[in-house]
Amino acid sequence: MQDLVVGRLLDLTHTIAAPVFEGCTFPWEVLPKINAFVVSLGRALSPDEYDNPQPNVWIAKTAKVAPTASVTGPLIVCQGAEIRHSAFIRGSAIVGRGAVVGNSCELKNCILFDEAAVPHFSYVGDSILGWQAHMGAGAITSNVKCDKSLVTLRDGNRIIETGLYKFGAILGDLVEVGSGCVLNPGCIVGRNSTVYPLNSVRGVVPPDSIMKGRGNIVRKISM
């Protein structure tokens, strides 16, 4: 359980969203709070640093948003972030400093920490991506179970009730997810871990690990 707490997965100095984690033990507890938090934080942002081009949308003056991107609030796009061609942001989202939302990617109810990258053809919903986390082309977070029941989190032999109908994935800082991966509902990838391409990920991938395939997770070797 200790590997699942906020401080073991995420460095809160690398996000403008740090206050929303106050009082939360586990990061998924933040998901229902994102919408209201973005509105509250956005209204307090300096107009010298952020434009407010439409209701509940705040975009840093140093950010780049392609004219073909579709953005809907509540939304904050931080300094130096890049929203590329045909990206689709449906609201309740924070895109951190220097983060990338690439071509044809879709975001909804999520937090991208600073320098997180979702560059190509991905869906990120009801999820949190830590500092410098990266999702390869076509990797997606699946946020609703097929039977529409509440999402549970499997950690070894332990089943954790989240109480959430929609819960995609939590990627810790420095996580690398390969192309074509599906992160199933209630998936946690620990800090500094790597998931090889074309994996279907369930439950918890421990920190400092490599997931080569189902049942084949090895520890990273420190150099």
Image (cartoon, helix red, strand yellow):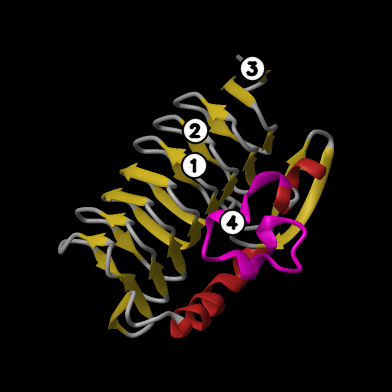
Dot 3: element: loop
* Magenta residues, start to end: 8-29
Q: Residue at x 59, y 23 (%)?
A: 211
Query: Distance between the Cα atoms at labels 4 and 3?
Result: 25 Å
The crowd level at tag 3 (other Cα within 10 Å; few <14, some 14-19, many 20+) is: few
| Circles 4 and 2 in contact, beta carbons < 8 Å | no
The amino acid pointed to by label 3 is Ser
Above or below, 39 relative to 122:
below
Q: Residue at x 47, y 84 (%)?
A: 44
User: In the rendered image, which residue does mark 2 sit on?
Assistant: 176
For marks 4 and 3, the one nearer the N-term is 4
User: In the rendered image, which residue does mark 1 sit on?
Assistant: 133
Nearest to the eye among marks 1 and 4: give it: 4
Q: Is residue 215 left or right of residue 159?
A: left
Query: Distance between the Cα atoms at labels 1 and 4?
Result: 15 Å
- Res. 152 in view: no
| Circles 3 and 2 in contact, beta carbons < 8 Å | no
The amino acid pointed to by label 4 is Thr
Above or below, 36 relative to 1:
below
